[in-house]
Image (spheres, rainbow, N blue to C red):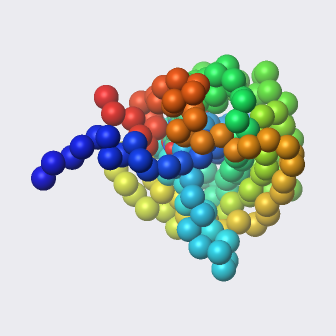
Amino acid sequence: MNIDIKAFYDLSYGVYIVGSCLDGKPNAMIANSVMQVTACPEKLAICVNKESLTHEYILKRGFLSVQAIKEGSDMVFIGNFGFRTGRNFDKFAKYKFNLTQNNLPAVLENTLDIFEIKTEQTIDLKTHTMFIGNVVSAEVLSGEGKPLTYNYYQTVMRGKTPRGATTFKG
Ligand SMILES: Cc1cc2nc3c(=O)[nH]c(=O)nc-3n(C[C@H](O)[C@H](O)[C@H](O)COP(=O)(O)O)c2cc1C
């Protein structure tokens, strides 16, 4: 069977901040693998690399936050959350955030909204875990701006994809 890598480029995604908080410490990363999977009830699926700190936090807490990133956000912002690990770097030193009712980080800059998700199912995908969860709250933070798409990130921003991402090819 032939696998043409170019076919994968026609799969569309957004670019999101995925966060959680454990023992009073917030952490967040960038993820393109986020999608709504049902409407009644509202459920999202999020695919997270097992080596990331955010994965550890989500597994232990059973809660995560998802935020759509604004188009026009710069590579410094993406790099802060998507190319560094919270294991040895404070991702919130530079960017302001609030804690939600369920104690999840909501980044206040470059984001459009905030979803709080309670995980209901986990699917082991070897390198990644897919978390499927119910939306317990959803709030628009900024009515202005367009959501950043993965296609825009790659073609206009010329952004790269790090090793842990679901779409990384070595
Ligand atoms: C554009 C982009 C998309 C990404 N998509 C994902 C993804 O869907 N899932 C994932 O696990 N990591 C993804 N990553 C990689 C994580 O953001 C990265 O591994 C991060 O450093 C993990 O941080 P942490 O260890 O503090 O949790 C993506 C990164 C970028 C820049």
Where does residue 110 sit, x and y in percent of width and height?
Answer: 78, 34
Q: Disc count in the image?
A: 0
Describe residue 89's horizontal placement relative to residue 100 as left or right: left
Instruction: Please state which of residues 56 and 135 is positioned toward the viewer in this rendering.
Output: 135
Rendered residue at 70%/44% (across/down)? 147
Instruction: Please state which of residues 68 and 153 is positioned toward the viewer in this rendering.
Output: 153
Quadrant in which residue 90 is drawn: top right
Is residue 120 visible to us here?
no
Describe residue 125's horizontal placement relative to residue 145 as left or right: left
Where does residue 67 sit, x and y in percent of width and height?
Answer: 72, 47
Describe residue 155's horizontal placement relative to residue 110 as left or right: left
Q: With respect to residue 27, does 65 lie above or below?
A: below
Describe residue 32's horizontal placement relative to residue 106 as left or right: left
Where does residue 156 sit, x and y in percent of width and height?
Answer: 57, 27
Q: Which residue sits furthest bottom?
A: 40
Q: With respect to residue 94, does 48 lie above or below?
A: below
Q: Quadrant of the C terminus?
A: top left
Instruction: Please state which of residues 87 and 71 is positioned toward the viewer in this rendering.
Output: 71
Quadrant in which residue 139 is drawn: bottom right
Where does residue 92 sit, x and y in percent of width and height?
Answer: 76, 28
Q: Which residue sits furthest left?
A: 1
Is residue 161 visible to us here?
yes
Rendered residue at 82%/33% (across/down)? 109
Instruction: Please state which of residues 68 and 55 is positioned toward the viewer in this rendering.
Output: 68
Rendered residue at 46%/38% (across/down)? 165
